[in-house]
């Protein structure tokens, strides 16, 4: 269950990054939703770190956020998607998977 919570925290990380790009921290409903998603992301990360080591949880959380935000930017905002950027994103994904599957037993 802590891994599910951690993935949800990472998805909230992506969502608030998109909200920040779209609305900023303005006094609008979008801006308010962005702040709520930030807080939810931190709350879920807090819950996940109660059972997952700090380095693993934080690395996976930020990795999901980075990969998700970069993918959103490329797919929806027309940001460059050349092979070098995609390769770098693949390396982040490899790191996330390594943190998950190479973690010591019992995590």
Image (tube, grey):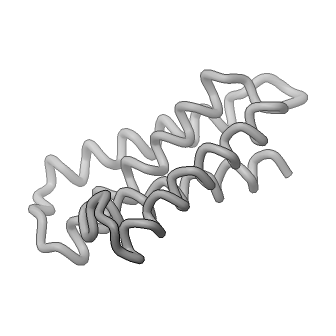
Left or right side of 15 for 89: left
Q: Give me the residue at 90% from left, 29% from top.
A: 106
Q: Nearer the viewer, residue 54 or 17?
A: 17
Q: Is residue 57 left or right of residue 74?
A: right
Could you tell me residue 70's position as x and y percent?
Answer: 28, 57
**Residue 38, relative to residue 100: is it above or below?**
below
- Residue in view at x 72 percent, y 27 percent: 103
Q: Who is closer to the viewer here, 24 or 91?
A: 24
Quarter of the rendering containing residue 40 = bottom right
- Residue that lies at the very extreme toward the right in this rendered image: 106
Horizontal and vertical percent for residue 39? 58, 50
Q: Is residue 54 left or right of residue 28?
A: right
Residue at (65%, 59%) from the top-left corner?
8
Left or right side of 33 for 8: right
12 or 4, which is in the foreground?
12
- Depth check, front residue: 42 or 77: 42
Q: Position of residue 9 (x, y in %)?
A: 62, 52
Quarter where residue 107 is shown:
top right
List x then y, in percent, for residue 49.
74, 32
């Amino acid at each position: 269950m802590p891994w599910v919570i951690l993935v949800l925290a990472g998805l909230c990380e992506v969502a608030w990054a998109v909200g920040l790009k779209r609305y900023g921290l303005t006094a609008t409903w979008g801006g308010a939703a962005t702040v709520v998603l930030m807080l939810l992301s931190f709350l879920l990360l807090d819950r996940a770190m109660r059972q997952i080591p700090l380095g693993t949880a934080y690395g996976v959380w930020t990795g999901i956020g980075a990969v998700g935000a970069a993918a959103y930017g490329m797919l929806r905002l027309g940001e460059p998607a050349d092979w070098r950027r995609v390769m770098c994103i693949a390396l982040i994904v490899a790191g996330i998977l390594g943190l998950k599957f190479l973690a010591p037993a019992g995590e």
